[in-house]
Amino acid sequence: MLEPRRENLEEYAIVLDYLPTGRSSSARSEPIVQMIGEEKFTLLEAVPKVPEIKIEERVYIGKGERDKIAIIKGRLSYSDLTEVSKSELNNAISNVIRSNEKKFVGIFNSAGPLNIRMHSLELLPGIGKKHLSAILDARDEKPFESYADISSRVTLLQDPVKLLTDRVVLELKGESRFYILTKPPAREYTY
């Protein structure tokens, strides 16, 4: 018997923008919250239960009883975000990456090749063949333990948090062929 496919649903999200009267283009005037999930950086739009939601606030959006979010309206694309959401995006992503250091350092430790010509670490902006070689050599000696460990053992490498943040933003904009840190954007079909 086949197991039902269980999608990784977001449990928590970071609020990017709060629109107390909703979108100006919307037919119905209801408060709207734009947020980004912590697990797969899913961009979401929701209706809040309470009017006191603040930008950068962490809210529960899982299957259980939610205290601040009434309904998840659906996924958003990057182009659907408000200007406030876009300006808060980098900060929210960086905070999630910093607070989950073990998970994201694990990416540097376990990333493998995508095909015979390209390694998945090369998808991070600023990582070319020389940086890739240095990262692989350093992790072969000993797995990385922290962002500081990566920075100290791989010379001339930018801040690992910034590299990961830039990659997440690139994927959210839909400007990538490969999605290693986010869910691929929902495809719109034309007939």
Image (spheres, rainbow, N blue to C red):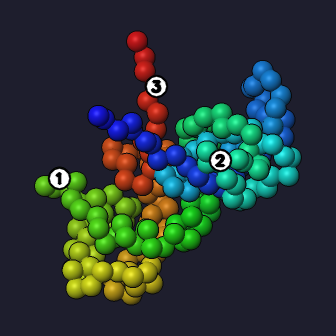
Residue type (three-letter) at the residue carrying disc 2:
Gly
Q: Residue at x 31, y 35 (%)?
A: 2
Question: CA–CA distance between discs 2 and 3?
Answer: 30 Å
Dot 3: what SS? loop
Q: Which mark is residue 78?
A: none
Q: Measured from the top left, where is residue 90 in percent x and y?
A: 58, 59
Question: CA–CA distance between discs 3 and 1?
Answer: 28 Å
Dot 2: what SS? loop
Q: Which residue position is annotated with label 3?
A: 188
Among numbered discs 2 and 3, the one appearing first in the sequence: 2
Q: Measured from the top left, where is residue 183 in percent x and y?
A: 44, 45
Q: Which residue position is annotated with label 2?
A: 64
Q: Label 1: few (<14), some or many (≥20) within 10 Å?
A: few
Q: Measured from the top left, where is residue 85 in percent x and y?
A: 67, 49
Q: Nearer the viewer, residue 126 or 82?
A: 82
The reply to whether discs 3 and 1 touch (Cβ–Cβ < 8 Å) is no
The quadrant in which the C terminus is found is: top left
Q: Nearer the viewer, residue 170 or 102?
A: 102
Residue type (three-letter) at the residue carrying disc 1:
Asn
Q: Nearer the viewer, residue 170 or 21?
A: 21
**Residue 113 position (above or below residue 36):** below
**Residue 183 position (above or below residue 142):** above
Q: Measured from the top left, where is residue 34 in percent x and y?
A: 68, 44
Q: Which residue position is annotated with label 1?
A: 115
Residue type (three-letter) at the residue carrying disc 3:
Glu
Q: Nearer the viewer, residue 51 or 86?
A: 51
Q: Label 3: few (<14), some or many (≥20) within 10 Å?
A: few
As drawn, the residue found furthest toward the front would be: 1
